[in-house]
Image (cartoon, rainbow, N blue to C red):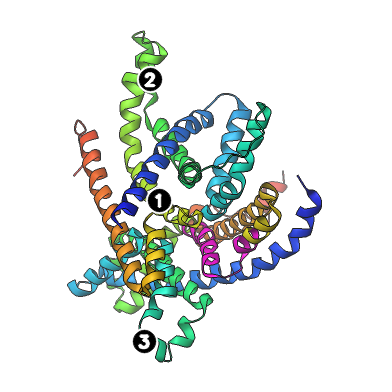
């Protein structure tokens, strides 16, 4: 179970990282001045948030190799390509978590007061410096609570990857339950492990939030 | 794209729609009652009750739904006492196991929404109700509950969408709803994208219709936020000019 727990953590972390990348790009696309880019991002978040996670996982599980082989054949390689379960899981959960991150980051960007952007322009900051010094620190702070929720979702969604055969907590519990004929015991252990992970990360996010908000005065 | 195959798969996918809707609507209905109970326990002055409600919500929100489903469907069969009792006719059926897991799960999430709603009821309303001499039960029924529901409704829309998506997990315990049927067609035909588009469209349509319906309920429940009604008859004095 310990190795399976590490696997769950590894898949969750890599999906979250992919999701954050997609989220940053998605938020930029949604706030873009070019209308078709906005529509594309809108379509992505609508579908990825409206369709069951399990369906997305099946899409990549059954279709991932096909897609990879198609791309490879364009470049002249016609052999069989098999994508491992870890990659499929990361990409599938990453796509879902990316859609939620997009909305969180978009909201955080919009929460930065426009007066600050004007002030930065007035003192002659160029775009990159303004992004680094003004936008990034504040967007990170505003997005943190929302990203905490996205992390919890991501962590729990990785349980669904067990259908692809990747040995994470859920799969391990299923196998152990089958061989020992004690399903209740092993699923309770699995539940406790997830509870441990969510509680720990919740605490971590609380710490991060108070760190990010250390210079901010609060009501009450 | 294989349009022939897509066209032929539509009836079988729609055949799973009935089961999907049964799962969603039944567990939302039952889950709503669980949620009210849990929310009231959470707000109760008795420490034992509120501690129970807190733990319940903590456990059900902190673990994946898949674990909860497997725990009920596979796990409970481990105990001979349950297998021998009358409960077994109930827990033997994957349908009722799924309903139970979904109900308990959505109950936990919804109870937090209702709690937030109850806590947002302005104190002045409660004082006014007391001043009118309303009993506690009547005050809850006529004042606190309606206002709390109205407050919680927008967030409840998200919970409904989550429930629609969660119903796909029933396919992991042999129930053939839309996702289960989609998986079967995909694994025999390997028309992955085609079937994904169809099944995805079905879910998006359900979500769209349900959120619209909730939007309508919200509109009905908040007449005070709409503009003053337009007079049906034009005032007669103006026409005389």
How far is disc 1 from disc 2 in space, using C-alphas? 29 Å
Residue A140, quarter of picture: top left
The residue located at (40%, 91%) in the rendering is B84
Task: For mark 1, name the chain.
Answer: A
The residue located at (54%, 61%) in the rendering is B168
Which residue corresponds to mark 1? A153
How far is disc 2 from disc 3 in space, using C-alphas? 63 Å
Q: Mark 2 packing: few (<14 Cα in 10 Å), some, or many (20+)?
A: some
> Which residues lie in the magenta part?
B159-182
Q: Marks 3 and 2: in contact by CB < 8 Å?
A: no
The residue located at (39%, 62%) in the rendering is B109
Residue A172, quarter of picture: bottom left
Residue B162 painted magenta: yes
Task: For mark 3, name the chain.
Answer: B
Q: Mark 3 packing: few (<14 Cα in 10 Å), some, or many (20+)?
A: few
Same chain for labels 1 and 2? Say yes or no: yes
Farthest-out residue, top: A124
Give the dominant element type of the magenta stretch: helix, strand or loop: helix
């Amino acid at each position: 179970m310990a190795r399976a727990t590490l696997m769950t953590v590894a898949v969750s972390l890599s999906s979250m990282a992919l999701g954050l990348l997609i989220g940053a790009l998605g938020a930029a696309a949604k706030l873009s001045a070019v209308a078709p880019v906005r529509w594309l991002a809108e379509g992505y978040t609508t579908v990825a948030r409206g369709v069951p996670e399990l369906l997305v996982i099946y899409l990549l599980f059954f279709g991932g190799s096909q897609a990879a082989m198609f791309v490879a054949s364009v470049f002249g390689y016609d052999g069989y390509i098999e994508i491992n379960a870890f990659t499929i899981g990361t990409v599938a959960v990453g796509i879902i978590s990316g859609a939620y991150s997009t909305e969180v980051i978009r909201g955080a960007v919009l929460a930065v007061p426009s007066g600050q952007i004007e002030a930065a322009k007035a003192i002659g900051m160029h775009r990159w410096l303004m992004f680094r010094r003004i936008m990034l620190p504040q967007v990170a702070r505003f997005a943190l609570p929302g990203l905490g929720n996205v992390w919890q979702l991501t962590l729990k969604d990785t349980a669904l990857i067990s259908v692809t055969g990747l040995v994470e907590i859920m799969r391990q519990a299923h196998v152990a339950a089958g061989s020992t004929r004690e399903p209740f015991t092993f699923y309770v252990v699995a539940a406790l492990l997830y509870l441990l992970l969510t509680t720990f990360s919740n605490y971590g996010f609380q710490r991060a939030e108070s760190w990010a908000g250390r210079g901010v005065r609060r009501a009450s | 794209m294989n349009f022939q195959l897509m066209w032929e798969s539509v009836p079988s996918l729609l055949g799973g729609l009935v089961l999907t809707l049964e799962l969603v609507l039944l567990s939302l209905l039952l889950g709503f009652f669980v949620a009210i109970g849990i929310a009231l326990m959470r707000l109760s002055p008795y420490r034992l009750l509120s501690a129970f409600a807190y733990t319940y919500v903590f456990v059900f929100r902190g673990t994946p739904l898949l674990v909860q489903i497997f725990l009920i469907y596979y796990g409970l069969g481990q105990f001979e006492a349950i297998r021998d009792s009358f409960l077994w006719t109930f827990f033997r059926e994957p349908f009722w196991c799924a309903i139970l897991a979904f109900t308990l799960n959505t109950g936990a999430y919804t109870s937090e929404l209702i709690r937030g709603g109850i806590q947002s009821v302005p104190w002045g309303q409660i004082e006014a109700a007391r001043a009118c001499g309303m009993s506690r039960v009547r005050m809850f029924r006529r004042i606190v509950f309606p206002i709390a529901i109205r407050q919680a409704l927008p967030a409840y829309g998200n919970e409904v969408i989550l429930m629609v998506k969660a119903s796909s997990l029933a396919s992991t315990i042999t129930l053939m709803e839309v996702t289960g049927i989609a998986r079967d067609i995909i694994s025999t035909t390997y028309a992955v994208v085609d079937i994904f588009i169809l099944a995805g469209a079905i879910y998006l349509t359900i979500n769209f219709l349900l959120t619209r319906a909730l939007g309508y309920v919200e509109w009905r429940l908040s007449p005070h936020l709409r503009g003053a009604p337009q007079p049906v008859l034009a005032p007669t004095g103006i026409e005389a000019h």
